[in-house]
Amino acid sequence: MEKQQKSLLELAIGESATVVAISSQKQTMQKLHQMGIRVGVDLQLLRRAPMKGPMLVKVSDREIAIGFGLCSKILVGAKN
């Protein structure tokens, strides 16, 4: 059975999910990887800024702000 995927933008505040895919260019994927965001990693949405502002996510024990455009390229599924 296939996991249902959605964009990081669709997560509710407080919701946790697992990164299942990143649809972006190599350079952007490297930047995300350096932040600890890669396929298979669990994250939690902590806060969403208004008007397409950045989103604050918790990855491991770190809080990371990610811009709206970048969030749209991160696909997540049900947490493992």
Image (tube, rainbow, N blue to C red):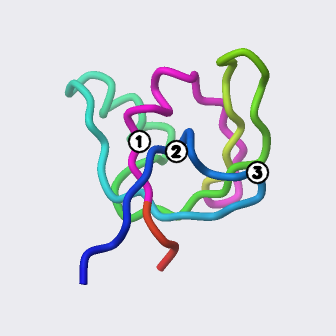
Q: Are marks 2 and 1 in contact (CB under 8 Å)?
A: yes
Q: Along the line of sight, which residue is nearer the eye, 53 or 40?
A: 53
Q: Residues within 10 Å of mark 3 (few under 14, many from 20)?
A: some
Rounded to the nearest angstrom, the CA distance separating label 3 from label 1 is 16 Å
Q: Label 1 sits on what residue type?
A: Ile
Q: Secondary structure at mark 2?
A: helix
Residue reaching furthest to the left: 26
Left or right: 32 as drawn, with respect to 8: left
Residue beneath disc 2: 8
Residue 14 lies, with reference to residue 26, above or below; the image says below
> Label 2: few (<14), some or many (≥20) within 10 Å?
many
In the rendered structure, the answer to whether residue 45 lies left or right of residue 75 reads right
Q: CA distance from mark 3 to mark 2?
A: 11 Å
Quarter holding the N terminus? bottom left
Q: Quadrant of residue 48?
A: top right
**In the rendered image, which residue does mark 3 sit on?**
13
Q: Which residue is mark 1?
A: 74
Quick one: label 2 or label 1, which is nearer the N terminus?
2
- Report whether 30 appears left or right of 37: left
Q: Residue at x 39, y 48 (%)?
A: 75
Please say if 17 is above or below 73: below
Amino acid on which the number 3 mark rests in the picture: Ile
Q: Which residues are magenta?
A: 60-76
Q: Position of residue 77 (x, y in %)?
A: 43, 64
Whichever of callouts 3 and 2 sits on the residue coming sooner in the sequence is 2
Out of 21 and 10, give the one closest to the viewer.
Answer: 10
What residue is shown at x 61% (from left), y 54% (from top)?
Answer: 59
